[in-house]
Image: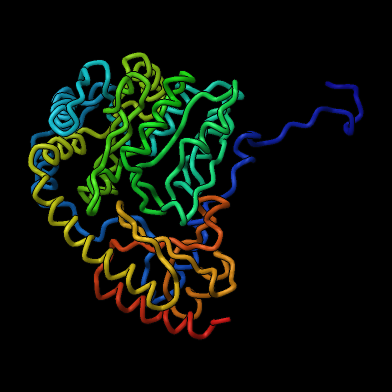
Amino acid sequence: MSTRPRSQRRKYGLTSKRVEQLSPSGIRRFFDLLASMEEVISLGVGEPDFVTPWHIREAAIYSLEKGYTMYTSNLGMPELRQELSRYLRDNYELGYNPDSELLITVGVSEGLDLAMRAIVNTGDEVIMPDPCYVSYSPCVILAGGTPIMVPTSEENNFEISAADIEARVTSKTKAILIGNPANPTGAVIPKDKLLPIADIARRHKLLVICDEIYAKLIYGVEHTCLATLPEMKESTILLSGFSKAYAMTGWRIGYAAASAEVIASMTKIHQYTMMCAPIMVQVAAIEALKSGDASVAEMVEEYNQRRLIIVQGLNNIGLSCFEPRGAFYAFPSIKSTGMTSEEFAENLLIEEKVAVVPGTAFGQCGEGYVRCCYATSLADIEEALSRMKRFVDRHKK
């Protein structure tokens, strides 16, 4: 037993210092408020309002009927990896070896976590845009790294610029992390602006982690897969999945495509944590890749109609909103009301029962904005706009 006075004994915290650095999700607090209220129209949850197409659900049901309830390879079912390899070749002319360069993950969120833990050493820096998806910065911190935020603005369509990235590269920089299309802004970085970012990565020997979960949800522009740029395949970790385009959020199925060295490191972590994605979900993903394009096209057409209506509606009520070109989010400015993002979101929910997410949930540069998800019915969007107009008129400065 220690003979030192209790006051001199070393004190240990009960939780990790890395975890203590993290702030609770700014999204979850509003969902908690939402759960206690009735007749709320939610523009908050980033989730399709479509049900997963029947043929995809049927494939999973049939797999259960056949007794597919066992583990798969840590990498994922060979048939799924082969189908994914075909998909990436047919869509992007990218050749990934299904046996060493593809990993099936439990959603893109797990893929991001695995990527960060596989490449980041303590003290490494990862450059990313602000605002950005809520998991980006925490995943870097949990891996022992330091997030380096690059401000983006409405004036530049919330596109991260190569010059701003270059200005933040140091001897500690390990990687650049971007979402394209982006959550929460709906920004799509065009090829001519991705090329100089790729040049920075090549010159400084950096990895680029590109979250392309919304790649199929684009409107009037062309999506460029970063790994297709010259000499970028080996230094890109491509993350994507099935949640958004195929309306499969609850299925939790995604993938990573990268060099064999990176995939091997990610798989080491994956095999000790998740082990493998559920087999019946992998079967559903195979069906999505084989026969899901028509369903995706129908959903994209509907999202586009909603996108045009909500953006025009927000501008008409005095909340200026640039035109998002991807995903299913509008990111209007609420600066005209004089409220902070959190005040606006909370007061709107309480007074008019419309749920939006404060822009600050996605970073400091989100102040003065809120995220509105238009993956909900046109009727709900129109009613939400009507309620928001009453709210804005009431609080005009």
Seen from the viewer's position, the closer of residues 52 and 67 is 52
How far across and how far down the image is residue 207, in percent? 43, 24
Task: Please tell me whether residue 272 is drawn above or below residue 87 in the rendered image.
Answer: above
Task: Please tell me whether residue 352 is drawn above or below residue 378 in the rendered image.
Answer: below
Q: Residue at x 14, y 47 (%)?
A: 57
Task: Please tell me whether residue 193 is drawn above or below residue 47 in the rendered image.
Answer: above
| Image-quadrant location for residue 82 | top left
Question: In the orientation shown, which residue stands out farthest toward the top?
Answer: 261
Is residue 107 visible in the rendered structure shown here?
no
How far across and how far down the image is residue 195, in percent? 36, 32
How far across and how far down the image is residue 306, in percent? 25, 66
Seen from the viewer's position, the closer of residues 171 and 71 is 171
Q: Is residue 300 left or right of residue 275?
A: left
How far across and how far down the image is residue 127, in percent? 52, 34
Quarter of the image containing the C terminus? bottom right
| Image-quadrant location for residue 263 | top left
Is residue 273 visible in the rendered structure shown here?
yes
Quarter of the image containing the N terminus? top right
| Image-quadrant location for residue 372 | bottom left
Q: Residue at x 46, y 70 (%)?
A: 36
Q: Is residue 144 left or right of residue 385?
A: right
Task: Please tell me whether residue 213 is drawn above or below residue 12 in the rendered image.
Answer: below
